[in-house]
Image (spheres, grey):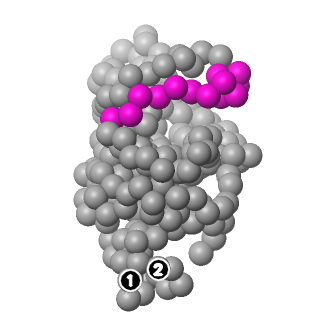
Amino acid sequence: MMRVILSAAAGVALSLTLAAGSAAAVETRVSPQGIARADATATPAKIRRKVRRVARRHDASPAAATQARRVRVAALTGAPPAPRPVPPAGAPAVTKLSGYKKGTIVVDTGGRRLYYALGNGKAYVYPVAVGKQGFTWTGKKKISRVADWPDWRPPAEMRRRKPNLPAFVKGGPANPLGAKALYLGSSLYRIHGTNDPHSIGTAASSGCIRMRNEHVTHLSRLAGVGSTVHVVRKL
């Protein structure tokens, strides 16, 4: 008999006890909304149906369904689930944006979007990660520096909050600042890439604006030192 604990999509954890033959006792733990249990002996077919129901209840997106299938296969075979793939970033979409001069960057922290004004009422729009609760801010800055694969030195305040952080991380694919960093004035804030593309679209940072590496590289070809950046709560 083997007990396997797996993480599924959208905060769903599965805990399965696999016995000899096709029967298995399955318990699904749903976080944070509550706990739903299926304690009776279940066949693999019942396990598959349970995984699908939980995944649908928490996230009906194709990505979540795909991850649920990986978890189902892992549960039935005993193999660990494969990591969730990151789809290519692709080119930014063009959308409407009025009230800002051409070449201006606007960060909508509420919508978790960054806009680059193209003029004539249009803009490129990129998904971003923004500051988590307690670390959001608004204001107007100018880009003071642009760096490729920047080194990262976590500020002292951040290291006090997270004592396990290193004092220095050399630039590269494992660096949290990613492929580019656009420094905002004399502040500690940056618009930068990431080594965690799954975080894009969330409130996860300590105030910096986080982009996919492909997108921050695209943006850096348009904006540079002296470009104006507006950070607003909502457009």
Helix, strand or loop status at disc 2 = loop
Residue at image x 32%, y 39%?
Answer: 148
Helix, strand or loop status at disc 1 = strand
Q: Is residue 21 left or right of residue 209?
A: left
Question: Which of the two residues, 91 or 28, is positioned nearer the viewer here?
Answer: 91
Residue at image x 56%, y 50%?
Answer: 185
**From the viewer's perspective, is residue 8 above or below residue 175?**
below
**From the viewer's perspective, is residue 165 above or below residue 37?**
above
Instruction: Point out which mark residue 101 bears.
Output: 2
Q: Is residue 55 visible?
A: no
Looking at the rendered structure, the number of numbered marks drawn on it comes to 2
Q: Amino acid at mark 1?
A: Gly
Q: Is residue 149 visible?
A: yes
Q: Which residues are magenta?
A: 149-161
Question: Which of the two residues, 212 or 70, is positioned nearer the viewer here?
Answer: 212
Q: Amino acid at mark 2?
A: Lys
Residue assigned mark 1? 119
Question: Which of the two residues, 3 or 100, is positioned nearer the viewer here?
Answer: 100
